[in-house]
Structures are given as C-alpha cells and as structure tokens.
Image (cartoon, rainbow, N blue to C red):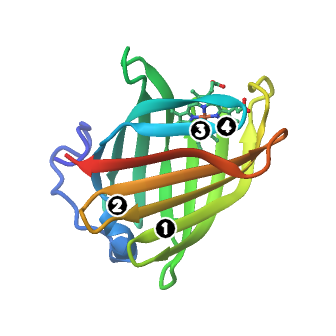
Amino acid sequence: PYLNSPISQDCETPQLNPVMEPLSWMLGTWLSDPPGDGTFPTMKPFQYLEEVHISHVGQPMLNFSFNAFHPDTRKPMHRECGFIRLKPDTNKVAFISAQNTGLVEVEEGEVNGQELSIASHSIARISFAKKPHVEQITRKFRLNSDGKLEQTVSMATTTQPMTQHLHITYKKV
Ligand code: HEM
C-alpha cells in the first residue's frame, strides 16, 4: 500500500514516473539537522525545526509537505504543501504551494544536477492576510555531497527588498 487510503491499499507501490527522475534526489522524509535559521531585516533572528515529506504516487509530479515547529515548545508554526512538476523532456520545474498563512504561490525555475532554483511566478493571498505582504519569493534546494538536503528561501515584501528569510539543512530519516 502506498497511500494509506482505502481505495489504493491493494495497489502495488508505484515506480517513479520517468519524467520525475531528475528530481528523484528530493524524495523522502527529511528532518531539520541542525535547526533552521530564520532571518529578515524586520525581525529578530529565530530558529525552527522542520519535517519534510516528498513523495509520489506514480504520477508525473512529486507531492510535498513542509511542517515547521518551534524548537523549544514544538508548537506547529509555518506549514505548506503542494506539488512539484517537471515539463517533460526539459529541466523546467513548477512548484505549486498552499501555505497556512493564507498564501498560495506558483514558482518556476530549473533543475540542474542536484540543485533546483525557482522564483515566484504568481502569488495569491486571502483578503485578510497579515502585513507586510510578500511580493517575490526565490528558493534553492540542493542535495549536498554529505547526503543532506539544503533549502534557502529569500523574499521581497512591500517594505523590504529581496533578502534571505530561511536557511535550513535536513537529514534523511
Ligand atoms: C515573518 C513570509 C516561511 C517563520 C514573515 C513575514 C513574511 C513571511 C512576509 C513578515 C515579514 C515582516 O514582518 O517584515 C514567509 C514565506 C514563507 C515563510 C513567503 C515560505 C515561502 C516561514 C517558515 C518559518 C517562518 C518555514 C518557520 C517557522 C516566520 C516568523 C516570522 C515570519 C517567526 C516573524 C513573526 C511573524 O511575522 O509571524 N514570513 N515565511 N516563515 N516568518 Fe515567514
């Protein structure tokens, strides 16, 4: 069984869709190690824990969830989930994410080897989203030679130019 779902429980574990092979290095369950670093000119630096699941069900896309927690209280913080798609026969990637803050975004970019660089293409938010609003997002994911996954997120808001907000490395569990 691959989905813990009544409908799919009799289904064989599917093979990775060949279209997704260039992103196979992202697959797995990952835990922050060490805790992530949050920064931005407007805020006191902070740390966070994060649990990441990147999986597939045989479709030509990956499914992801990123769940952040407070390092001391372990209370849930930022959460996002979505899909990663690859344009077949190219290195063009689309990253589609819904965030618990009321933000929905599409990022696009490229995978080159074990590095994925993407930038926001469109951002939508709920009418009562907290200010300041984010206007642009860029992310970089990389599989390091020690087998750890690394993510760096930068953003521009209505009050600040593009600046790093998050940097984190994860070990596979
Ligand atoms: C603040 C965006 C991910 C923790 C903010 C702010 C924005 C933002 C626009 C307000 C900045 C300001 O006041 O000038 C985003 C976006 C994310 C993201 C677009 C993902 C792409 C995360 C993650 C964490 C996090 C993973 C981990 C816990 C915080 C904290 C603050 C903050 C603690 C300051 C307090 C607050 O405003 O809630 N973020 N964030 N963010 N973010 Fe993020």
Quadrant location of residue 33?
top left
Residue type, label 4: Leu
Between the C-alphas of marks 4 and 2, the distance is 23 Å
Residue at the location (56% across, 47% down)?
Answer: 97
Circle nearer the N terminus (3, 2): 2
Nearer the N terminus, badge 4 or badge 2? 2
Q: Position of residue 130 (x, y in %)?
A: 74, 24
- Give the label, 1 or 4, closer to the camera: 1
Q: Secondary structure at mark 3?
A: strand
Against 115, residue 158 (above or below) is above
- The residue sitting at 57% across, 57% down in the picture is 139
Q: Is tag 1's residue or tag 4's residue first in the polypeptide sequence?
A: 4
Where residue 91 appears, as percent x and y from the top left, is 51, 79
Q: Earlier in the sequence, mark 3 or mark 1?
A: 3
Q: Reading the chain from its start, which is encountered first: label 1 or label 2?
A: 2
Q: Are marks 1 and 2 in contact (CB under 8 Å)?
A: yes
Q: Which mark is residue 26?
A: 2
The structure residue drawn at horizontal position 22% and vertical position 62%, both measured from the top left corner, is 14
Does the beta carbon at disc 1 come under 8 Å from ligand 1? no
